[in-house]
Amino acid sequence: MGNIIDSLSQFWQFTGFANMTVSHIIMICIGIIFITLGIVKEWEPLLLVPIGFGIIIGNIPMFPGLNIGVYEDGSVLNTLYQGVRMGWYPPLIFLGIGAMTDFSALISQPRLMLIGAAAQMGIFGAYLLSVAFGFAPNEAGAIGIIGGADGPTAIFLSSKLAPDLMGAIAVSAYSYMALVPVIQKPIMLLLTTKKERLIEMPAPRVVSQKEKIIFPIIGFILTAFIVPSGLPLLGMLFFGNLLKESGVTRRLAETARGPLIDVTTILIGLTVGASTQADKFLTGRSLLIFGLGLTSFIIATTAGVLFVKVWNLFLKEGRKINPLIGNAGVSAVPDSARVSEVVGREINPKNHLLMHAMAPNVAGVIGSAVAAGILLSFLG
Amino acid sequence: MKKRILTAFLILLAAASLRAQNVIDLIISEVMVDNDASVLDDYGDRCPWIEVFNTSQGTVNIAGCYFSDDPSNLTKSPIVKGDLRTKIGPRQVVLFYADGNSSKGTFHLNFPLRAGSTLYLVSNDGRTVIDTIDIPEDIPAGQSIGKFATNNKETIFDDVHAYTPSPMSVNGKHNQKSKSDIIKENDPHGYTLTIVSVSVVFLALLILFTIYNFSGKVFSGQIKFRNPFKRAARPAGLAALPAGREEEVALAIAMALNAECGGEAEAAIALALHRFLSECTHDAEPFVITIRQKPGAWNDKTRNFRKQPR
């Protein structure tokens, strides 16, 4: 009888209940909130549901030595996590993004690229703030990239510059990407007048297939020559787009934008979530990173909208740009462009801004990859 | 046949370039002839040693290469294959003992290293010399000669000169500050980095804007280049059309068809055909169904079926 009680007592020590702490409960609650937001509110469910469940997986209390945790060498989760740690999931995601993105809007209105550059101020604004808060330059660079509103880029850069902060940075980046409609809309309304919101932009011209094929080749060569350190991201992005536009690699393009990106999204979401183990994640620095991430999003949106407003001062009537597409300079494709469309139609239901907003939106993807390359060159 | 030859050539070229990326990245970074107080080999003996450094960012296997001190016999001392230790990690070194007794193990050469000789590191083809080092006559005991890397992350090396022995370690400045530390010292508030980075992002997208703005004007017909071959390349029926008036012609065809047949579809087809043939803008989506008359082996299903027996 004594042996049975001893065994049961020993077994109790193995269970999650015996090893549970308040931190574990908090993190599991955060995971449940992520899942709830994804399912109920439908905020980026493809990201929030895997990340939320990953957070729960990573925070099941257990005693060390079972070789199952994400930080234990050789475990299944650790093996899957290598794609995040070594930074090879993000380029695969970029391949899929390239294969599903239509750059026509950008090719037909290349001037809107500059909005994508202006919105990158969020990255560097957050960098300055992070340095001011005492983060080392490499850590500040990794935190700043949250302002690019690009989860894969954030993971790629943080895995190179500050691996210790990667969990907090990745979760922060994806969380704010999911919250793009909530964060951006009030800023857009605050910074624009009713008259500005009513600006109608001329329809973009039709883009020929030749242009669409030439775009990724020229675009890649130019950007990669300027910032070679952005090669993995830029190369895969433009390669994916070439697969889409060439018209002769349909199967490859469909794989890249379908099964490949889906599998990678599942793995990246789940393992990033699992990497947020309470003991490593619930720290003051993580909270600070979340605060800085939010600030970087606000700066990026503000910079994009204000840039258009200032630019409009120099443009003739009929060539003016609706500042509501300024927010789309961050690279959350296509969510931020969708916000421009929704806010624009609220004041004029006939004013469709989606295609116009897609131009700075995809320019933002290129811009954030370039910015990541620059930070990697200086700080890596 | 030509395609096959071309493919084979490209594969050979790729294989050759892969090989070229490997062993040629090795250098003889340091040698010591008179070892009186330096490193001991696995048998506890002090003998001349040769340090080889992998300058690349990838692992290089030195197995199959050769050492020699005789230009007429470059394959004098082969490095045996099958020993995992011959793989040299990126920016790492490996040590060979030139004691004239290769039976002692993988890292022992079959000739003793002598002052005044030239040491050759030869590729696994037995002909290509990867690196050489001239050993001076007057090298004092206890001193090595080597190539000193000015920066551990670069592959720039000084000329060979006398050196305090440092076997099994990279000949460069150690404990160098990281880029982040340097930035922290030179730009404590981050303003310089921010200004430079923002400028580069704008520059990159500004260049793209300039190019696509120009190409957009070309493709939309705002800028026209005279193509001397264009007229000849056009179908015979279209050659008679007045140049530069395609839109008017298209409109006339469409109106005529509309009046004649009363069908909008025919008019649309005429317009689309004309725009396509005159190389105007034609937005062909990637998922249009295209019927090819001459399918290649890749997509020709009939070529992949087994033929029915007669």
Image (cartoon, coloured by chain):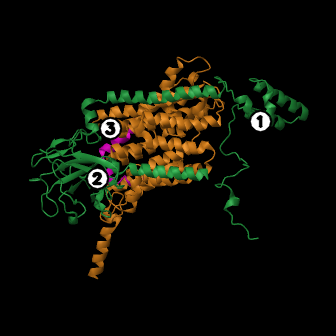
Chain colours: A orange, B green
Q: Nearer the viewer, mark 1 or mark 3?
A: 1
Q: Nearer the viewer, residue A191 or B269?
A: B269
Q: Is residue A10 magenta?
A: no
The reply to whether residue A282 is in sight is no
Crowd around label 3: few <14 · some 14–19 · many ≥20 (10 Å): many
Q: Could you say where residue A125 lies in the image, as x and y percent from the top left? A: 38, 31
Report the number of numbered marks: 3
Which residue bears the numbered disc 3? A379
State whether discs 2 and 3 lie on one chain. Answer: no
Quarter of the image with the C terminus of chain B in it: bottom right
The reply to whether residue B245 is in sight is yes
Instruction: Kindly identify the residue that appears in the image at 29 percent across and 42 percent down.
Output: B153
* Chain label for disc 3: A
Q: Nearer the viewer, residue A76 or A246?
A: A246
Distance from the alpha carbon under mark 2 to that under mark 1: 73 Å
Type of amino acid under label 2 = Ser
Which residue bears the numbered disc 2? B72
Q: Could you say where residue A214 lies in the image, as x and y percent from the top left? A: 58, 36
Q: Quadrant of residue A285?
A: top left
**Is B295 above or below relative to A305?**
below
Instruction: Say left or right for B168 vs B297.
Output: left
Q: Could you say where residue A302 lies in the image, as x and y percent from the top left? A: 46, 29
Instruction: Kindly identify the residue that appears in the image at 39 percent across and 49 percent down.
Output: B20
Q: Nearer the viewer, mark 2 or mark 3?
A: 2
Crowd around label 2: few <14 · some 14–19 · many ≥20 (10 Å): few
Q: Tag 2's secondary structure? A: loop
- Circle number at residue B273: 1
Instruction: Say left or right for A176 vs A253.
Output: left
